[in-house]
Amino acid sequence: MGPARFRFFRACAVLAAAIGLPAGCALRHPTGPPKPDASPNIVIIFADDQGYGDLSCYGHPTIHTPHIDRMAAEGMKLTQFYVASPVCSPSRAALLTGCYPKRVGMHRHVVFPPDDWGLHTDEVTIADLLRERGYATACIGKWHLGHRRGLLPTDQGFDEFFGVPYSNDMSRFHRSESDTYPHALPLMRADTVLEWEPDQHELTRRYTEEAVNFIDRHHGEPFFLYLPHSMPHIPIYASEAFAGRSPRGLYGDVIEEIDWSVGEIRAALERHGLSERTLVVFTSDNGPWLPFKTRGGTAGPLRGGKGSNWEGGQRVPCVVWWPGRVPAGSISRAVTTTMDLLPTIARLTGAPLADRRRIDGHDISALLSGEGGATSPTEAFIYYTSNGEPAGIRRGPWKLLLEAGELYDVEADIGEKWDRAQEHPELVAELRVLAEARDAEITATARPRMSVLEPLFKAGP
C-alpha cells in the first residue's frame, strides 16, 4: 500500500480512536465482529531454506533447538503446513498477501538484483492491515519482493525496515562469475544503504538485536514484527559464539543460532509481560537446498527439497505459540498454508477484509485455538512450480502430480514412494480437472506485479 493511502487510513484510525470506536470501524466492517480487546501482537519468524526435518522437535537427531522445541511444547506443531511456492520470492508474496503467487503476479521465479519488478503496492499485506489498525510494524531481515524505489517494505505497510533486499548469495563476492557480476549486497535501513557487503557471520545476531529493540520500543502498543532471516540460505554463516557447536557442522551451527534468536524474541516478550498477548509463528519459506549436501538442510521423511513439488519442497515446519490461546503440546495434522496467516490474523485482530481483493487463504483461528471439531478449511491445495506453472493438487490425503500423472496418499505415504494412480483412475481424472479449473480461475483474475524504472541504488560500491 502506498504512502498516500496509508496516511488516509492512519487518519481514519486516529479519528476512530478519538471518538471511542475500534480503528477498523473507521474503515469498513471486518469479516466477523472483533472482540473488544482484539489487539494481540503478531510475530512471524521466517527462516530461509530450512527443511522440514531441521528442528529437533521435528525429529532431527543432532541439531538442538531448545527454544523452538519449547514453543512446540507450550503451543502447537503443524505437521501438514505448506508454502505456496518452492522458491523464495513467490513464497514470501503468498505469506504477506494471503494469495497464490500467480494471483498477485509474483509467480515467475525470484527477484534478482537487475530486475525492475516486485510486489505491487496496490496489494494488501499483513502489514497494511495491521498498520491501519494502529499497529507499529517492522520488517527485519530479508525482503526479496522488489528493491527499486517504491517497492521496499516501507512501501508495503511496514513502518521500519532493517535488512537486505534480496538473497545473501546475490553478490559478486559469492558468485562464480564474480569477474563479470556487478551487483553487491546492501544492508539497508528504510531506503538507505547502511553498508555494502555486511559481515554475514553477524546477520542473525544483528537482525535479532534490531527485533528485540523494536519490541522494547513498542511494547506499550500493538505491534507486528516480521523477522525473515537470511539464513540458512547459502552461503551459510554462523557467528563466533555458535561456530563449531553443533555435531551437524556449520549448517547445524546456523540453525542453532536461529533457535537462539527465537529465544531472544521470546525473552523480550516475557520481560514486558506480553506472552499472553502475542501470537508467534515460526516457519520457513520453502524446503532445503539439497544439492548443497552438508551445507543444506534435510526434509526428514519427506521426498525432495527446494525447487521441487515433492512434499520436501513445499511442506515446511511450523510452530505456533500463544499461551492461553493455543493449546500447549498440541499437534495439528490439518492441511494449512502460509496463505492462511493473513485472514487468520485479520480475524484475530478485527482487521477489515470484507471488501478487500480476492485472496486464497482461509481463517484457521479455530484450528489454532484447538476448537473441538475444527478441520482444515482448504478444500484443495495447488502446487506450483518455481516459474508458476501448475504442477500438482492435493485434496484430502490424495496428491496428484499433473505431468507425471502420479497419485500419492501423502498421509499414509509421507515419503511419496508408492504411486497409486492405476488403482484410482477416476480420482486422477477428477483431481486433474479440479487443478486445471482452479488454475484457470487464478490466471483469469490475476493481478499485475509492479515495475519501476528508477533504481534505488547503484549495483554496489
Image (cartoon, rainbow, N blue to C red):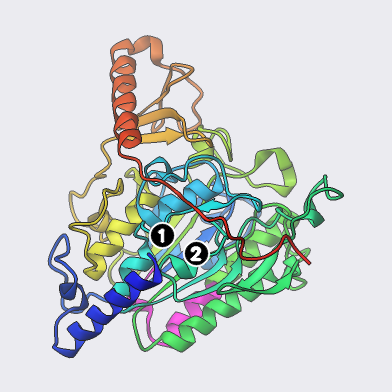
Side of 184 relative to 322 (left or right)? right
Q: Which residue range is magenta in the image?
A: 263-279
Mark 1 lies on a secondary structure that is loop
Q: How many angstroms separate mark 2 from mark 1 (CA)?
A: 8 Å
Q: Residue at x 53, y 81 (%)?
A: 212
Side of 311 relative to 400 (left or right)? right
Q: Which residue is mark 2?
A: 150
Quadrant of the image containing the C terminus: bottom right
10 Å crowding of disc 1: few (<14), some (14-19), many (20+): some
Residue 439, given in percent of the width and then of the height, sits at 34, 31
Side of 70 relative to 453 (left or right)? left
The amino acid on which the numbered mark 1 sits, given as a three-letter code, is Thr
Residue 27, given in percent of the width and then of the height, sits at 19, 71
User: Looking at the rendered structure, which numbered label has been put on residue 121?
Assistant: 1
10 Å crowding of disc 2: few (<14), some (14-19), many (20+): many
Residue 308, given in percent of the width and then of the height, sits at 55, 34
Q: Is residue 283 magenta?
A: no
